Image (cartoon, rainbow, N blue to C red):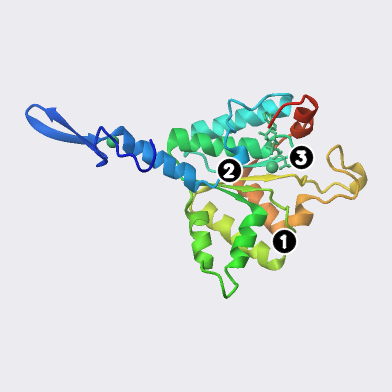
Amino acid sequence: MSEEQVCQRCQGTGWLLDDARGAQVARRCGCFDERRMRTLVEQANIPRRYRACRLDNFEVHNDSHKDALKISRQFVKNYPAQDVGLVFIGPCGVGKTHLAVAVIQELIEKKRAFCLFYDFRELIREIQSTFTPESTLSESDVLAPVFQSDVLVLDELGAKRTTAWVEETVFYIINHRYNHKKMTLFTTNYPDTDAPEDTRDSFYKKGSESLVDRIGVRLRSRIYEMCKVVEMEGDDYRKMAKQASYRF
Ligand SMILES: Nc1ncnc2c1ncn2[C@@H]1O[C@H](COP(=O)(O)OP(=O)(O)OP(=O)(O)O)[C@@H](O)[C@H]1O
Ligand SMILES: [Mg+2]
Ligand SMILES: [Zn+2]
């Protein structure tokens, strides 16, 4: 049903009247919930490329995929009873963003949760842009949904190296959310290890940085406190799909 079309069942009022033993009883028309769900989907800010991502179309190619999918399903099932969010860690193209988006789409569809997706760099950029004199938005305009959303996806954590200001701002955001029992899902392709460089394995190439190098000890430790770690491994799905000449 498009925005312009008025619901034929309730003439756009959102209510239906039933006859119950001579008296009229009002109940919600189905279009009310359809509208609510459409609004939640629009507000979620999910990139077009990821709109089709669901838990059911996530393919399992190895044990880490299997575990990550299980944890994601559990998260949706338990919501909102759990205390911690998730942090998906793994190399490029293993499906971290796919799963994080799939979780919030299912939370919208099944639990009508207010969810929000943000690329980490995009969020920082949007906050910073409010500091310019020509900005029509204030910092709190940008931050309000970030604070208020029931579930926030912060994609590509560490993709921008933090400065003291960024660290403080992100700390403030996630702390506020944690204190208000609001869940946050992170994705990152910076491995979490303090191991010496020469013992770092597979996706940790020699000389590359760790999550701590990118976001600092304080932020890293807070995120670990507020999230369950979901480690993912495997080949880059984008490359595999290209080789198999799939179309995206
Ligand atoms: N196991 C999978 N099953 C189905 N589709 C997948 C799977 N893994 C990845 N994809 C698809 O491949 C593309 C890349 O995956 P995605 O963006 O989730 O990777 P990522 O781990 O977030 O990578 P990056 O670190 O580069 O952000 C997406 O279109 C996603 O839907
Ligand atoms: Mg990603
Ligand atoms: Zn209606």
Residue plotted at (64% across, 60% down): 124
Mark 3 near ligand 1 (CB under 8 Å)? yes
Asked which secondary structure carries label 2, the reply is: strand
* Percent of width and height locating residue 70: 61, 28
Residue 162 badge: 1
Please indicate whether residue 117 sits to the left or right of residue 113 in the image: right
Q: Residue 161 appears in which quarter of the rendering?
A: bottom right
Pick the quarter of the image with the N terminus: top left
* Percent of width and height locating residue 7: 29, 36
Asked which secondary structure carries label 1, the reply is: loop
Tell me the crowding category of disc 1: few under 14, some 14 to 19, or many 20 or more residues within 10 angstroms, Cα based: some
Identify the amino acid type marked 3: Cys
Residues at discs 1 and 3 in contact (Cβ within 8 Å): no
Residues at discs 2 and 1 in contact (Cβ within 8 Å): no
Please indicate whether residue 210 sits to the left or right of residue 37 in the image: right
**Tag 3 or tag 1, which sits nearer the N-term?**
3
Q: Residue 51 appears in which quarter of the rendering?
A: top right
Q: Which residue is mark 3?
A: 92
Please indicate whether residue 145 sits to the left or right of residue 190 in the image: left
Q: Is residue 141 above or below residue 13?
A: below
Asked which secondary structure carries label 3, the reply is: loop
Residue 49 or 235: which is nearer the viewer? 49
Residue 182 or 187: which is nearer the viewer? 187
Residue 85 badge: 2
Identify the amino acid type marked 1: Thr
Q: Is residue 176 above or below residue 106?
A: below
Residue plotted at (47% across, 38% down): 108
* Percent of width and height locating residue 232: 73, 34
Between the C-alphas of marks 1 and 3, the distance is 20 Å
* Percent of width and height locating residue 21: 8, 26
